[in-house]
Image (cartoon, rainbow, N blue to C red):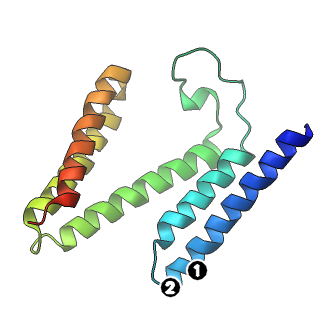
């Protein structure tokens, strides 16, 4: 490993650990604790996990052919499920206060889930669900009702 690669890895590891520590602290103090914690773990896994074989070409490769399930893909699944459950729980909790906004948020989460489920449609099919999900989520977050 060259000097430049070693320096880059060290900087990314420091960023990852800083985010993890800030995330743990923010769990106890006001702040986005889980977000920082997951961001730190994601940076750590991205630095630590070798991608084998190397990704080449212009197509989006299947993760299963480049990453082992544990820990990288398992951590992604846990983070995805946790974030989804948290978003739906918060939306359901405030449903009486902001019925339209929170229904749009739940609709956005459902659209994203459907898009993940039908990922076999290819990049074009997934893009449609991504646009729908992003639009519903944005509308839900900016809605005052």
Percent x, y of residue 55: 65, 23
Give the secondary structure at mark 2: loop
Give the secondary structure at mark 1: helix
Residue marked by disc 1: 25
Q: Could you tell me which residue is drawn at 91 percent across and 42 percent down?
A: 3
Q: Could you tell me which residue is drawn at 62 percent across and 65 percent down?
A: 19
Q: Could you tell me which residue is drawn at 60 percent across and 14 percent down?
A: 57
Residue 137 marker: none
Percent x, y of residue 132: 22, 38
Residue marked by disc 2: 29
64 left or right of 140? Answer: right
Percent x, y of residue 78: 49, 55
Q: Quick check: marks 1 and 2 in contact, CB under 8 Å?
A: yes
Q: Could you tell me which residue is drawn at 42 percent across and 60 percent down?
A: 82
- Distance Cα–Cα, label 1 vs label 2: 6 Å
Which sits in the foreground, 71 or 111? Answer: 111
State which quarter of the image contains the C terminus: bottom left
């Amino acid at each position: 490993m060259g000097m430049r690669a070693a320096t880059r890895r060290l900087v990314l590891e420091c960023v990852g650990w800083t985010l993890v520590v800030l995330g743990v602290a923010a769990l106890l103090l006001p702040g986005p604790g889980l977000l920082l914690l997951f961001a730190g773990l994601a940076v750590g896994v991205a630095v630590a996990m070798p991608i084998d074989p190397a990704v080449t070409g212009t197509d989006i490769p299947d993760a299963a052919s480049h990453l082992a399930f544990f820990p990288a893909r398992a951590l992604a699944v846990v983070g995805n499920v946790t974030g989804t459950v948290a978003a739906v729980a918060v939306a359901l909790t405030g449903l009486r206060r902001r019925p339209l906004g929170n229904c749009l948020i739940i609709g956005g989460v459902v659209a994203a889930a459907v898009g993940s489920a039908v990922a076999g449609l290819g990049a074009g099919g997934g893009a449609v669900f991504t646009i729908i999900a992003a639009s519903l989520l944005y509308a839900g977050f900016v809605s005052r009702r």
